[in-house]
């Protein structure tokens, strides 16, 4: 008999595999055709592989790094047959993405998490789902509605608070977001919360004044609780491809991003963006969104991701 954890793991892998269908059909099928179509490893094969990887949204830098590493291993291990390259590519892709990041845990009190991102990435929803996940693990969670530009964002977070059994600190629409964040941290400290999740306003990465506001929120949180925020998670929409990489670079200049939440990895996305973001920012992907349900935000696992990517139907 399988235990509940094993059933959940298999269900998650199945959903992940389904979410990566587009990437798998566009990337892995082409790679396998390339490797099977040539008996020898040639320079042309490397060039074709690089082009396939770029098309799968790994980005030029990540694709170049991956192919160069592959080339070095082929030479060092004196590999001659192209068909052997699939397994090596999987190993190197896992290495490129790196170890899955775990959410920080402050041993001396609440862990404060800022959630940032562009409008439309699923930022507020991801904040709510993260609360749902953490409460499900037995944590006491408090939500701070610091997206005061949209009344809908405050209402949305309140709904998630009810759904996840997390308290919500809010001010009126148009209030100072930093003041909301400060009050949320103070409330979390006084109530003995395990996690304080601060939802910030979605913003275009080109809006300098809003980026400066993010810095201010971070400073104010630090005044309310020295050492906080302990995490700044950037929410990225996996369907936006290389544009997401541009967003990530600019956000990382405004605030010290500690991890990525990758949303909408549900069949329409090019999953190669995971490798591009991890390789460019050197920041781990910590959670991925695989659907609309409250429990569809899952901790990222590098091995499962790559295996699901290469798993044939």
Image (cartoon, helix red, strand yellow):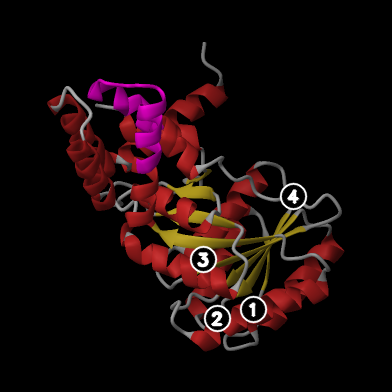
- Badge 4, how many Cα within 10 Å: few under 14, some, many 20+? some
Circle nearer the viewer, 3 or 2: 2
Mark pair 4, 2: CA separation? 26 Å
Mark pair 3, 4: CA separation? 21 Å
Sequence-first disc among 3 and 4 = 4
Give the residues in magenta. 68-90
Sequence-first disc among 1 and 3 = 3
**Residue 16 visible in the shown view:** yes
- Name the quarter where the C terminus is drawn: top left
Of helix, strand and loop, which one carries label 3?
helix
**Residue 26 visible in the shown view:** no
Q: Is residue 72 magenta?
A: yes
Residue ID for mark 3: 124
Sequence-first disc among 4 and 2 = 4
* Residue depicted at x 26% and y 46%: 50
- Badge 1, how many Cα within 10 Å: few under 14, some, many 20+? some
Mark pair 1, 4: CA separation? 22 Å
284 versus 45 height, above or below: below
Of helix, strand and loop, which one carries label 1?
helix
Sequence-first disc among 3 and 2 = 3
* Mark 1 and mark 2 residues within 8 Å of each other at the beta carbon: yes
* Mark 3 and mark 4 residues within 8 Å of each other at the beta carbon: no
Which residue occupies the foreground of this view, 25 or 2? 25
* Residue depicted at x 32% and y 21%: 79
Residue ID for mark 2: 211
């Amino acid at each position: 008999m399988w235990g509940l954890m094993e059933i959940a793991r298999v269900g998650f892998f199945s959903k992940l595999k389904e979410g990566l269908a587009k990437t798998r059909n566009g990337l892995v099928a082409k790679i396998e055709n390339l490797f099977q179509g040539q008996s020898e490893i040639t320079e042309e094969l490397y060039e074709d592989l690089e082009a396939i990887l770029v098309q799968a949204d790994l980005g030029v830098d990540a694709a170049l790094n991956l192919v160069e590493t592959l080339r070095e291993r082929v030479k060092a291990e004196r590999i001659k047959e192209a068909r052997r390259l699939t397994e090596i590519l999987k190993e190197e892709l896992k290495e490129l993405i790196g170890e899955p990041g775990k959410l920080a845990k402050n041993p001396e009190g609440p862990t404060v998490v800022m959630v940032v991102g562009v409008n439309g990435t699923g930022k507020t929803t991801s904040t709510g789902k993260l609360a749902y996940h953490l409460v499900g693990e037995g944590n006491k969670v408090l939500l701070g509605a610091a997206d005061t530009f949209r009344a809908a964002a405050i209402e949305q977070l309140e709904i998630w608070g009810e759904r996840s059994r997390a308290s919500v600190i809010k001010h009126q629409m148009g209030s100072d977001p930093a003041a909301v964040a400060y009050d949320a941290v103070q409330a979390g400290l006084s109530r003995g919360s395990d996690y304080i999740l601060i939802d910030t306003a979605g913003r275009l990465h080109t809006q300098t004044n809003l980026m400066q506001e993010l810095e201010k929120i971070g400073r104010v949180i630090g005044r309310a609780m020295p050492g906080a925020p302990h995490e700044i998670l950037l929410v990225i929409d996996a369907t936006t491809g290389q544009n997401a990489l541009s967003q990530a670079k600019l956000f990382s200049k405004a605030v010290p991003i500690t991890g990525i939440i990758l949303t909408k990895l549900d069949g329409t996305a090019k999953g190669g963006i995971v490798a591009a973001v991890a390789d460019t920012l050197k920041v781990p992907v910590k959670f991925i969104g695989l659907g609309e349900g409250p429990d569809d935000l899952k901790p990222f696992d590098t091995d499962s991701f790559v295996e699901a990517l290469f798993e044939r139907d």
